[in-house]
Amino acid sequence: MGLVVQKYGGSSVADAEGIKRVAKRIVEAKKNGHQVVVVVSAMGDTTDELIDLAEQVSPMPSGREFDMLLTAGERISMALLAMAIKNLGHSAQSFTGSQAGVITDSVHNKARIIDVTPGRIRTALDEGNIAIVAGFQGVSQDKKDITTLGRGGSDTTAVALAAALDAEVCEIYTDVDGVFTADPRVVKKARKIDWIAFEDMLELAASGSKVLLHRCVEYARRYNIPIHVRSSFSGHEGTWVSSEPLKTQQQGDKPVEQAIISGVAHDTSEAKVTVVGVPDKPGEAAAIFRTISDAEINIDMIVQNVSAASTGLTDISFTLPKAEGRKAIDALEKNRSGIGFDSLRYDDQIGKISLVGAGMKTNPGVTADFFKALADAGVNIELISTSEIRISVVTRADDVNEAVRAVHTAFGLDSDSDEAVVYGGTGR
Amino acid sequence: MGLVVQKYGGSSVADAEGIKRVAKRIVEAKKNGHQVVVVVSAMGDTTDELIDLAEQVSPMPSGREFDMLLTAGERISMALLAMAIKNLGHSAQSFTGSQAGVITDSVHNKARIIDVTPGRIRTALDEGNIAIVAGFQGVSQDKKDITTLGRGGSDTTAVALAAALDAEVCEIYTDVDGVFTADPRVVKKARKIDWIAFEDMLELAASGSKVLLHRCVEYARRYNIPIHVRSSFSGHEGTWVSSEPLKTQQQGDKPVEQAIISGVAHDTSEAKVTVVGVPDKPGEAAAIFRTISDAEINIDMIVQNVSAASTGLTDISFTLPKAEGRKAIDALEKNRSGIGFDSLRYDDQIGKISLVGAGMKTNPGVTADFFKALADAGVNIELISTSEIRISVVTRADDVNEAVRAVHTAFGLDSDSDEAVVYGGTGR
């Protein structure tokens, strides 16, 4: 039996009862003969409470001190978890990110992992301990300051440790049973996915699926660490995310060339900015997106409309997180003369629906059926963007739920469908 | 202007308002031209809340994990304090005990400081920052584990840093105005002491005065660091604890040889154990106190009664913290045959009153007046113990307050007295 990294989120360790339940599950893995490394988030609302305190003392807390503050949260949960495990008769030791060797850059509040040197973890395991590691945190390489990894940081800590320790699997425990073909709150008939490839999971994550964040999947893919997303409240198998299908699925007879639809993701957290009346000449798009990038704003979709020949002007639209909207508008206005455009339009009543699946681009039927499903549901499409394994459209926010259900049904993903619609290999 | 170390207790930083008030005071010291190092405790009840959580997950939490848990408390307060200072336009950086170079032994929950290597603090100061350091915590020399210093740990951190940084003064901020001639809750006319020698403060602390703990004073005395105990809620001068009297007092004409009474301390946290019927032969006391010491129990007073010639047996009494009573009785019972005694008596309804002052032993009038004051107040004395600069008696717990007031008045310490009673130099 090999080494397993387990990660438990804040909802799994929200109170003393939760911590004791999680401790039992960890001890089970240990009893099954595994070496166990556990990555844990802060308890329930701890982080929000700390942020609230920070806001009370300072409207603009410094990044370094904010990180120092927030990392107290995992320190509490990991120490309690280690105590709870010991109380079950097994030895456990907790480690801060710094002690676990999680080395990061110096960008406070959203540091990136540079290296993982888990010497102390390895020693603790070799001495028969269960190692408990604080998620979400590290120590900066140059200044030796405490850093936090930002959103999804604990998942990334878990995958990074799994990679550094050459773990068999990284288990991400959460409050849902795994990754679904669509958000079960929107699509009642959504199905749990047993296995999904890294690439498809990346697209789902980028398209609004909240279960795993893009960053963590990317890390796992780079180091080829299988992720098992599952519930800490049940014993069910969850969703495996890996490069190779599960053995049980490999036995199937589906041709490799066919398109396999993984799921439908949606996202209503974005807004759309349209730069109107841009001269249709080389360098214009570059000027716009350099301005956006200098303001450290991450954008998602970009669409440039066909130029109207009569005016020589075109429109460029892009989507971005609503929270960044104000900043983007300000940055563009400030650089108006440098870029050269007529006006800006801002729209935060949009939604995005994405269909994700392997082999999509080589099976044009997928795109056609996707648009037909939306049309049948009366959903108007405002922007379109595609990749090798994903097709996304922007619609009115009000249409999103209806659109997701329509597409989910059209592609045979509903749990009462006999079989998912398959493209390509079937000669369709 | 030199370097000042300031320490703020949990009651001073109990909430966001408290943190902001303390931040202003720190900035004042900086504006006055000092280099400022601040040692801070956990906010208000944080530590108690964490202990409560620990008890919910494990009846006997491991020392290592308990320390990991508790140190989250200072991490929160120090980061918030640094933010609040920055919000006032001054630069501040917070440091954990480990980052501040507080090196300890490996005795979790009550580690002792072995060394202080404040390189990062010195650098932060040289760069113009105010340095905020987590009190109560350190890192073990051998295992690099997080440790806590136990009771009074934050005061000790402050004094240790002051020594390592060669500070001008260590200011201990608390919720009272300083050290008083007696507990103001018991003696309404208690006076604030302007200056007190290390030795007298050590005796007061050992005798029940809660303002400064023995350990911190001992450390300050060894490195000759003046301590200034004062309120974080007022701007008043507090009590100076140092080797030399303040300059203003040195101008006085009181002879050096006279007895100067510092104050009256009391303590009702102890219990008395009497070992009855011990053979009056060499090695008996050693056997008893080896047993107690092996059980890691700290004791206070020891009194051996005169042996009854007829039986060859004697009684030995000692006092110890009530919390240790059960453990002491168990240890002695277990070793009954090895020690040889008739029975054990346990009494937790006792109190201790101590008079502390320099030159006491060479001025027998002090002792006589002390006993007379107690007798006049109708207080019966059960045990007596003396040192160079202290005389303590054990009485019934119910008599303690009355006894303290009587002694305080008899020695002219009341705030409306014209002058304190002086021995020796006055020819009395």
Image: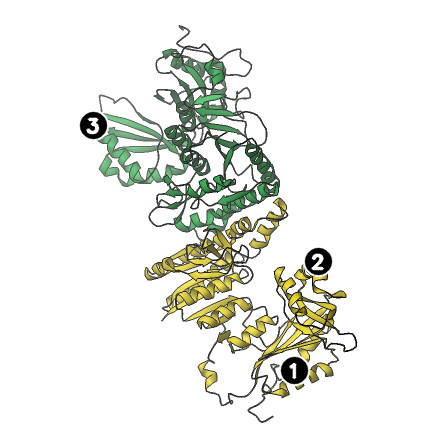
Chain colours: A green, B yellow
The residue sitting at the right extreme is: B310
Q: Which mark is residue B334?
A: 2
Residue A123: percent from left, percent from top = 46, 42
The residue sitting at the left extreme is: A282
Q: Residues within 10 Å of mark 1 (few under 14, many from 20)?
A: some
Q: Which mark is residue B409?
A: 1
Using the rendered image, report if marks 2 and 3 lie on a common chain.
Answer: no
Q: Which mark is residue A281?
A: 3
* Residue A106 visible: yes
The three-letter code of the residue at mark 2 reads Lys
Q: Chain of mark 2?
A: B
Q: Nearer the viewer, mark 3 or mark 1?
A: 1
Q: Nearer the viewer, mark 2 or mark 3?
A: 2
Q: Is residue B133 above or below residue A336?
A: below
Using the rendered image, report if marks 1 and 2 lie on a common chain.
Answer: yes
- Compute the Cα span from label 2 to label 3: 94 Å
Q: Secondary structure at mark 1?
A: helix
The three-letter code of the residue at mark 1 reads Thr
Q: Residues within 10 Å of mark 2 (few under 14, many from 20)?
A: few
Q: Secondary structure at mark 2?
A: helix
Residue at (59% x, 85% y) in the render: B420
Residue B238: percent from left, percent from top = 51, 73
